[in-house]
Amino acid sequence: MNLIQVNPDACNRDGVCVAECPMKILVLKDRRSVPEPVRGAQNLCINCGHCVAVCPTGALSHRSMSPDQCPPVRKEWLLTPEQAEHFLRSRRSIRNYRKDPVDRQTLTRLIQTAAYAPSGHNLQPVRWHVVYETEQLRRLTGMVVDWMRYMLREQPEFARKMHMDMVVAGWELGMDVICHGAPHLIVAHASAKDLTAQSSCTIALAYLELAALPLGLGACWAGFFHAAAAFWPPLQKALGLPEGHTCMGAMMVGYSKYTYHRLPLRKTPKITWK
Ligand SMILES: Cc1cc2nc3c(=O)[nH]c(=O)nc-3n(C[C@H](O)[C@H](O)[C@H](O)COP(=O)(O)O)c2cc1C
């Protein structure tokens, strides 16, 4: 199948697809021709879909996506600067969850939105592992505590600096300050060999945390869980990620018990200009 197909009747020869292609693999030979790929384009194309998305007339079809498959941008749904600022500022890390589970369909929708996060070279290396059963999450959280106990023995100075002594003491009193009693945990993982994977996973999780909000969900980065999953073999084994894959971040997810009513303040950004 050709890399791109252009409907000559619909193409207005404006050259926008040529200009916007990040790999510069499309050319418009003259005002009468339609865009075509350069030699070797098949191997260079990163399947980002920009050529399809930017065409104002829907004339261009890419072998991996046609205009019909790509929904139009709903201009009336785009946020105003005030709405976007309010939305981003109103996201909070949620640390008190209701016990009721989130249905799998909603979690799938959440992950599908997070999958629109940018990734290096559009490689989309992020894979998702949902610890859905709350009991299983408690068991895995217990393993994070085991790792902390180990760290307090082997590297006490570092462990105390990370407040692991307090976290373990809390756990022994029935307090979970690792996953905060969340019903579910979503792990982003990828091949450890992929150099862009850590950034891609972090950005995808940031998308996921934001996308949780309009679905009525609360989320919070699970930093302790992530650290333990990177270093503690028993947790790695129990998590059961594919061979060669590493946990590159984890997010607690559930329904928030409480509602926030104000936007807290943050440090004023320190900016340098040249
Ligand atoms: C990489 C990263 C790891 C984090 N790990 C934890 C964590 O393990 N437990 C927790 O309660 N919050 C964790 N957080 C949430 C931060 O504490 C939180 O973002 C910060 O206090 C600001 O609050 P806000 O997110 O409500 O604006 C983490 C955040 C990030 C970005």
Image (cartoon, helix red, strand yellow):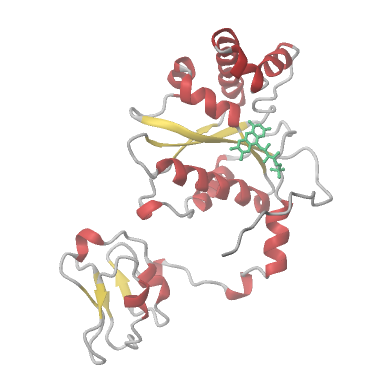
- Which one is nearer the viewer's eye here, 215 or 274? 274
Residue 151: x, y in percent? Answer: 56, 13
- Which one is nearer the viewer's eye here, 95 or 199? 199
Single out the residue that lies furthest toward the left: 39
The quarter of the rendered structure image containing the C terminus is bottom right
Q: Is residue 137 visible?
A: yes
With 231 as the anchor, is 140 left or right in this view? right
Q: Is residue 67 visible?
A: no
With 49 as the anchor, is 106 left or right in this view? right
Single out the residue that lies furthest toward the right: 261
Name the residue at 57% across, 12% down: 146
- Residue 4 occupies quadrant: bottom left
Residue 239: x, y in percent? Answer: 47, 24
Single out the residue that lies furthest toward the top: 153
Residue 162: x, y in percent? Answer: 64, 23
Residue 242, placed above or below residue 157:
below
Name the residue at 51% across, 47% down: 204
The quarter of the rendered structure image containing the N terminus is bottom left
Quadrant of ligand 1: it is top right
Single out the residue that lies furthest toward the front: 274
With 217 as the anchor, is 117 left or right in this view? left
Residue 70, placed above or below residue 220:
below
Name the residue at 47% across, 15% down: 234
Residue 165: x, y in percent? Answer: 68, 14
Name the residue at 33% across, 29% down: 244
